[in-house]
Image: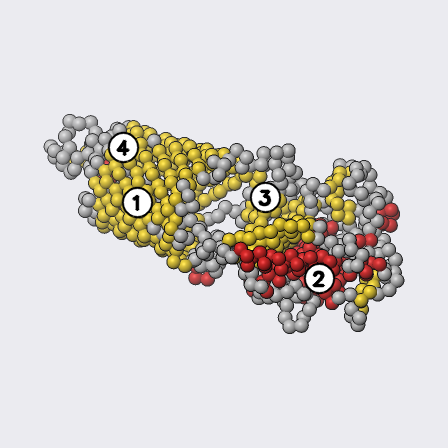
Amino acid sequence: MKKFTLTVALLLAGLVGRAQTQPAAETGYEARQLKIEEINFVSNYYHQEGNNSAVTGGIGTEKLTNYANSFDLVLSKIDRFNRVHTLSIDANIDYYTSASSDNIDPLTISSASKSDIHFYPSVTWRVADPRTRISRSLGYSYSREYDYQSHGFTAQVSKTSADNNREVSVRGSAFFDTWKAILPSELRPANYGSGAHNDRAGVDYKPRNSFNMALSLSQVVNKRLQLLVVLEPSLQQGLLSTPFHRVYFTDGSERIERLPGTRLKLPIGLRANYFYGDRVIIRSFYRFYVDDWGMQAHTANLEVPVKLTPFLSISPFYRFHTQTAVSFFRPYGGHDPNLLYHTSDYDIGNISTQFIGTGIRMAPPGGVLGIRAWNALELRYGHYTRSTGMVANSLTLLVKVK
Amino acid sequence: MTSTLPVSPLTDALTLHRRVLRLMGNRFEISVVTANDGAWAEARIDAAVAEISRVERLLTTFDEASETNRINARAGIGPVPVSPEVYALVERSLRLSALTQGAFDITYGGIDKRLWNFDKQLTALPDPQTARQLVRLINYRNVRLDPADSSVFLTETGMRIGFGGIGKGYAAERAKAIMQQQGVANGVVNAAGDLTAWGHQPNGQPWTIGIADPTPATSHTATQAFSHLCISNLAVATSGNYEKFVVIGGKRYAHTIDPRTGYPISGLKSVTILAPNAELADALATPVMVMGTRVGLHLINQLPHVGCVIVDEHDRLFTSKNMKLT
């Protein structure tokens, strides 16, 4: 099985409108057109050639082309309690194709999922109080794909220590998702559509809600070493199985996947970043995971970004993951028809995976390919292997436009 | 959980050497970025301080022997030969006066300060006649320059010139020039808010400044920045002090007097000018304040490489066309 994904993310900065109200106060001065020599007089402040001593301002002889033709002003708002308010708006669009989701219905050549546009806007409002060093934020995000849509709400409170070296943060988030219950073609009841664009009649929509907590403690140990411990309990409820997954039983029968309606997860993560000089960062990450479906997992990740020049960096990475299967997992044809829950999804089976690759990031001062608005270009390649024999290659292109 | 590459320092072990001291009656802050050579940086700052002190001796009105006071002493009597440096500065000042329709004027020193004593509580405005009488001696057209003997002549008795509206910017520009000549590639000269910056910060990032929040400081807060600008290889000057104003008849008046009418100006809280040259930025900030938003921006929009941010009395923000809000 081979899979190839191409993702393009476009980050759009939120735009702030310009004050366009009419200025009120009038003075005895008139708006008059300047004469050429008056404009030249001002320009002479920047040209200091030969014995032109109009300005004795020294040797500031940068060429005129080095001077800005415009200036960027970044706005934030400080309220009467001296708190800084910032509002950030992001709109991300992914375009992706996937091979496997085309096999839900082998009778149709092109199903709904063959290529999808994934659109996910988000809004975050953050209030930081420099006096108490507490910052609070509220966020909303929306995500939609061909088979589900999601509304997400996030609230976060964090506090920084007086020396700025320690931060404690608590985040709570809730995601209210709706899934389209697409069934394998041979298991659809009568009048149950495929879920494709013109065939949605009778298709069921099921909720899936997630409630997540994140408690984190970050500590700057010294100039080079930073540590982060994070505990992220979460509860999922609703349709947790994927209805287009087929399950085959020891008696030869076939049904759709069936899983419990709730799942409690508890991951504990430890992250350490080590700054080796100004050019190399060693990022390491370990996570232990346990849930009430009987799964235990270990993940370790190492990424070493290296800045080759001020404008070019590479970041090789390696990730290893191993997990035990949930207690309802059996491989193809191994399920006992008398048990209530059953899955053959190797995502929650007994597997280990490895992911190795590298990213390369270019951010030339004059813009990528000389295009000023194009700030940065990042290309990531990854090679992924699973103990089940699956091999995937991914190539991600990240384009940052200002 | 994803991780991205942070913006980290690009240069090796650059440090910032900074000295704060009182010069020209103002707080000066001189900063030099070097690769860990403190003694070298201190010597460059010494050279900058010496240059600013030299300019101060030339322009001060507190020393009877300064060139400025020698010109003022012979107002209405006769021309005074001065150094080429002061002559050139007066000449540029007069051209800036013409550019700003007299809103910038170095003969401002002739104002009668008896009426506008802002330290006392003001309750009423003078009548227009009285006000105009007070500024009758302010007129840049009454400054005669003679290139033959490099002399300056104030034609009216009682006239006085002063470089309060341009001197700090000129001194900052001179200090920068001296340090650049001596090899300082990255630095800032901040003359009480009139500042000029070149190169970059020790971490490789461009120099930035905040523009003060126009809303008054409350009991437990200081005035804060409400917006930010990159100012590498630029000079910045701000006119307008949020604490210095009087309220008469419900209207707020600044401590700046319109040299044409003799009245204190109202309507604007602050004007920030960006330009490649500190003297120019310094000299344009007050006139834009005097001319008002419409006329002031009309002027700035015609000047190459000059930007302007205005905050009016209703805390509204106006900018010149070349300011991009992001």
The mark nearer the N terminus, 1 or 2, is 2
Q: Is residue A213 visible?
A: yes
Mark 2 neighbour density, 10 Å: few (under 14) some (14–19) many (20 or more): some
Q: Chain of mark 3?
A: B
Task: Tell me, yes or no, whether dots 4 and 3 are on the same chain.
Answer: no
- Between marks 4 and 3, how big is the CA–CA gap? 47 Å
- Element class at badge 4: strand
- Between marks 1 and 2, how big is the CA–CA gap? 64 Å
- Nearer the observer, disc 3 or disc 1? 1
Q: Which mark is residue A290?
A: 4
In the shown orientation, is residue A308 left or right of residue B79? left
Residue under label 3: B226
- Between marks 3 and 1, how big is the CA–CA gap? 40 Å
Q: Chain of mark 2?
A: A
Residue under label 1: A301
Q: Which mark is residue B49?
A: none
- Identified by mark 2, the residue type is Leu
Q: Chain of mark 1?
A: A
- Between marks 3 and 2, how big is the CA–CA gap? 32 Å
Residue under label 2: A34
